Image (cartoon, rainbow, N blue to C red):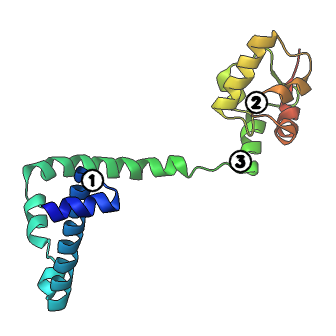
Amino acid sequence: MNLFNKISRKVGFTETESKIILFLLTALTVGIIINIVKNANNNPKLLEFDYSKEDSTFYSSDFYQTNSDSTEKNTQKRVESKPELSDFRTAEKEGKKASSSFSVSNKLDINKAGLNEFGELPGIGLKTAQNIIDYREKIGRFNTVEELLKVKGIGKAKLEKIKSFITVK
C-alpha cells in the first residue's frame, strides 16, 4: 500500500480519489475483457434471444385477456368516430346549408342570434359562434356587420361568406 500512497501524492490526488480512479479503471478493464471474449466466440446464442416463450406466457395471462377487451372497445370506438373526423365541409355544402336556413328577406340578426343559429352559418362552427356571443356580451351590441372582424376566428373571407345571411337590427 506504500507504493499506492507514493503514486497518489506524486499525481496530486488524495487517497480516496486514487481509490475511486483505480476502481473505475478496474471496472473498465473488466468490461473490455468481457466484450472481447463475448465477441471472439461469435456465438449466435449470446447475440440473439428468442422471446416467443415469454410472449406466449404474457398473452395467455388473465391480465392481458382483461385488457384486450378494453383495447377492442377502444379500437371499435376509434373506428366509429372516424366518420365524424373526416366530415370536411366544402364551400358548396356550407352554402346549401346556410341558404336552406336563411333567405335574403329572413336574415339572421347578429345581436339576437344564439349559439345554434350562428352555427348554421357557412364557415361558422360552435367555437366561433361562442366567440361571437362572448364578444357581443362584452361590447353590448353590434352596430355594423363589419364589427364581426374584431371577433377571434372571423376574417375578411369568412365575413364575405356570411355577409348575405346576417344583419344588424
What residue did someone put label 2 on?
152
| Horizontal relation, residue 63 to residue 114: left or right | left
Q: Tag 2: residue type? A: Lys
Mark 3 vs mark 1: in front: 1
Which residue position is annotated with label 3? 93
- Quadrant containing the C terminus in the rendered view: top right
In percent of width and height, residue 97 lies at 71, 40
Q: Earlier in the sequence, mark 3 or mark 1?
A: 1
- Which of the labelled discs sits on residue 144, or is there none? none
Q: Position of residue 98 (x, y in %)?
A: 75, 37
* Residue 41: quarter of image: bottom left
What is the three-letter code of the residue carrying label 3? Lys
Residue at 80 percent of width and 15 percent of height:
111
**Badge 1, how many Cα within 10 Å: few under 14, some, many 20+?**
few
Circle 1: element type: helix
- Taking 84 as reference, is 1 left or right? left
Neighbour tally class for label 3: few under 14, some 14-19, many 20 plus, Cα within 10 Å: few
SS class, disc 2: loop
Which kind of residue does numbered mark 1 sit on?
A: Glu
Choose the circle earlier in sequence order: 3 or 2.
Answer: 3
Q: Is residue 164 left or right of residue 1?
A: right
